[in-house]
Image: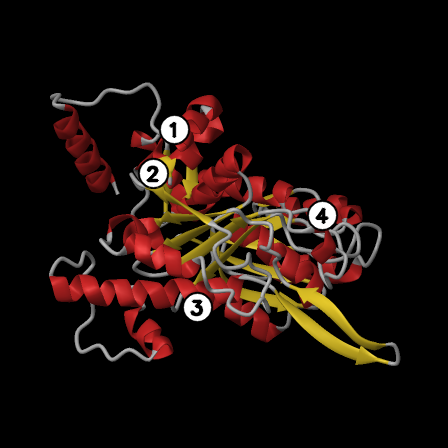
Amino acid sequence: MSIGLDAAKADLARLLGVLDVTYDRFLATSSAAGGLRMTVHGLVYDMTVKAGQEAALGAGARIIHATAGKLSDFDLADIERANPNLIMLAGGTDFGDREVAVYNAQRLLLLSVASPVIYCGNIQNHGIVKEMFDKAGRKLYITENVYPRLDELNVEPVRRLIHQAFEENITNAAGMENIRKIVDGTIMPTPGAVMEAAAILRDIAGDLVVIDIGGATTDIHSVTDGDEDVAAIQTTPEPVAKRTVEGDLGLYVSAQSLANLAGISIENLLPPIPSTPAELALAAEMAEHAGKIAMMRHVGHFRHSYNPKGRQTHAVGKDLTAVKYLVATGGALTRLPAAREIMEKFAKINTNSSILFPKVDNLKILTDRSYIMASLGVLSREYPTEARALVEKYVKE
């Protein structure tokens, strides 16, 4: 890790035309060791588990395992194999079910992996869960309930705590032992930092969707309240800031799975940085498919049901109809020559108005031209005014 940071400092010094770079604070984002890997455990999948997943994904985590109900021996074995960086324990609305979350806390203490646990379930269990973990000498974080009442999400307190836990425990990851010798400020998961920058940009410009196509994944971040009329027929609550990550839609690590989904025949995998005309053309084609598939997985849709009163229309999933901007970030959409054309195609995916997405030609396109949204997201934690000014300056049409 220090080799990469030292190389980055040397490169910055070269670009500035100085011998060395000095600084007062060193902040960082990190996806080292596979990023922030989490498991999520709750009571009901469509309620507390889903709420926990939304919080974890928005914080920049990669969900590697999730369970609903009481943890079985099989579940514990799956968690052992996954060896997560953090474990999230939810379950029960406030003053609702207590038994399952307490039972699962007891089961998690049987694990041989020493992953810290974040408890964000029924507030009535705070005392007993803390006592259990204190007696066992295991690391526990406690915060507000991620699903305090029926049909109410409360993801922001959990997201903030995930960032805190990540920062406090990142040095336990392989190869990260010396990180604190160099980085003396905030450390955030890279996707979580992109979400922070997206929230800043939304405050400046309006509701938006950020598309980040990388070598291993395609991430979609949306920040919008949606439309009031759509909210009136929505079946489940959605967070204002939502992230989805697609591990089968990368241009390098997961290129073969993306090619299979897109129906593209590839003889040779793309290099990490395509350079020849043929490589650039293939990368553009792959990026277009990755973005479209990821967007269709992220966006909600209308669903119809029938009863004695006739056909009823419901909205399912994330409502993006109020979005004004599509924002390009990530290597592909900030570096490929065809990036603008690809983004314009993304803006026109709603050809029949069946999805909760703006109508064709109703979107403006912004680009993170210097590929610094993640850097500005982490900067905002300690220097919010400066981060906002840089977002305005560098993320443009």
Which corner quadrant of the image does residue 69 belong to?
bottom right
Task: Name the kind of residue labelled 1 in the image.
Answer: Leu
Task: Tell whether label 2 touches label 1 (CB within 8 Å).
Answer: yes
Residue type at mark 4: give it.
Asn
Where is residue 221? Give x, y as percent. 49, 51
| Residue type highlighted by circle 2 | Ile
Q: Is residue 230 visible?
A: yes
Mark with earlier residue (3, 2): 3
Of callouts 4 and 2, the N-terminal one: 4
Alpha-carbon distance for marks 3 and 2? 25 Å
> Are circles 4 and 2 on residues that touch, CB within 8 Å?
no
Mark 2 = which residue? 372
The residue where tag 3 is placed is 293
Who comes first in sequence, dot 3 or dot 4?
4
CA gap, disc 3 to disc 1?
31 Å
Foreground mark, 3 or 4, reads 3
**Disc 1 versus disc 4: nearer the observer:** 1
Residue marked by disc 4: 145
Depth check: give the residue in front, 123 or 305: 305
Label 3 Cα crowd, 10 Å radius (few <14 / some 14-19 / many 20+): some
The quadrant in which residue 309 appears is bottom right
In the picture, which quadrant includes the C terminus? top left
Are there few (<14), some (14-19), or many (20+) residues within 10 Å of tag 1? some
Task: Estimate how packed mark 2 is, as few (under 14), some (14 to 19) or many (20 or more) residues with alpha carbons within 10 Å.
Answer: some
Mark 1 or 4, nearer chain start: 4
Residue linked to disc 1: 390
Q: Does dot 3 land on a helix, a strand or a loop?
A: helix
Residue type, label 3? Ile
Q: CA distance from mark 1 to mark 2?
A: 9 Å
